[in-house]
Amino acid sequence: MLTQRYFSYFCSFLSFGCGCKFFPYIWDGKECRLKKGSANQWFYFSIHRTVIVTMLTFSGFRLAQAFTRPGFPLLLKILNIAWVGGYTLALVAFYQWDVNEKEIMQFGNYLLNYADPANKEKREEEKAAKNRGAKAKRKLALPPEEENLQATLRKEEQREERSLGLHLLFGLLLFLGNPGVHTTLVNETPCAPHFTSSLAFPCLGYSATGVPFLHKVPFIVIEYYLICTMFISITFNWAMVYLGMSWVLKEINHFRRDLKHFSSGPEVVEFRGVEVIVSLVNNGFRPYLASFPSLLFFMVSSLVFGVVRLWHTAPLANLMFPLCSTECLYDAVTPLAVAGDISFKTRELNLSWRSSVASMKGVSRREKKMLMLHAESYNGVRVTSGHFFTFENTIVLVCMHNCIQLTLNMLVTFNA
């Protein structure tokens, strides 16, 4: 699923989060697995959670002040809205760890076991033996170009692995770069109402004049910690959900290739295993799946509005707008696109599987009937948003349309 390089990057990210007590787990570096957190781990984790709750309350109070008191600059309102959205999604992530700690750990270890390149060779051997066995059982002759076909399929899988690894790496790089860019705002606008520095400096209006840089350093460090806490919780959920969905999509693509090239559908254990994976994602990450599209696209809309209206006034000082909007958009679009692809391809697999069984030759009527019942028992898999909604293959277009519409409405409304 991942090459050794990208797998090590993912493990390093988990090791950093567990080592800094952002996650309620202990990282086992030898086995590359998550383990149940100790009381000490949970103590520091609860401190991070309390900080997020406190800052969300503080930012929400400041946002209410910004809209009730006249004279607040537009820049500060946009920043405050983005911070409230970020803290809200981070709080959802921390709440999710509280209620679904074991489910997330179980799924994370399944994912790490599957993504580990050391286990890839064994799975490939088992799959090749299964394909050969299916051919022999149904007395179908092996195609003379099977070796070339297998080589082509391996190359295709390697391209998919590299693509998945690059997507993962880009998301982790956005996480690494964003906190540093966000903290530059403390130096530029230390009296922004959602910053803790606004409580300490003598703010005249909404700007602090004559404050030495060294006096701002402690608040820059505080803001760096707050942004790291916010983004690492969001990035953890994004990485787990995105890789989990990619795992499901890869298995579905394998089933479709087997039907196309080997005329053999998945075994009961295989597609039931896929259903278990999707069930773990839907149950373990239900709060995040239900909230991340709305919150992230709302943040994207606000930040893009800031890019259009304010970035040209001070490109370096307002670099946060394009960079943060890029990360929010990336974290929202990538899992939604894969979830929509799963919904489309699982229906396609269902239809092609049944038609393949119906057109099968050289098997008895009884065996064909059993194979058809086997195919009909596969009802497909869906990634759900909460309890009632599923992500279809048009979800990205719908969300992008709503995001663009909201941005345009803001541009029209705040024209002055």
Image: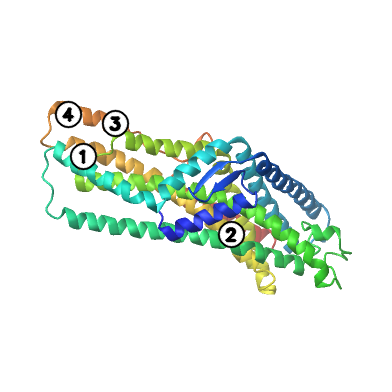
- Which type of secondary structure does the marked residue at label 4 adopt? helix
Q: Are marks 2 and 3 in contact (CB under 8 Å)?
A: no
Task: Select label 4 or label 1 by which is in front.
Answer: 4
Residue at 86% x, 73% y is 210
Distance between mark 3 and mark 4 Cα atoms = 14 Å
Task: Select label 3 or label 4 by which is in front.
Answer: 4
Question: What label does residue 175 carry, if any?
Answer: 2
First in sequence: mark 2 or mark 1?
A: 2
Image side of residue 298 versus residue 210, left or right: left
Residue placed most toward the observer, 399 or 225: 225
- Which type of secondary structure does the marked residue at label 1 adopt? helix
Task: Select label 2 or label 3 by which is in front.
Answer: 2
In the depicted structure, whether residue 391 falls above or below residue 408:
above
Q: Amino acid at mark 1?
A: Ser
Q: What kind of colouring is applied to the model shown?
A: rainbow
- Circle 1 is placed at which residue position? 356
Quarter of the image for residue 286 reads top right
Q: Are marks 3 and 4 in contact (CB under 8 Å)?
A: no
Instruction: Give the x, y percent position of residue 118.
Output: 38, 52
Question: What label does residue 367 carry, if any?
Answer: 4
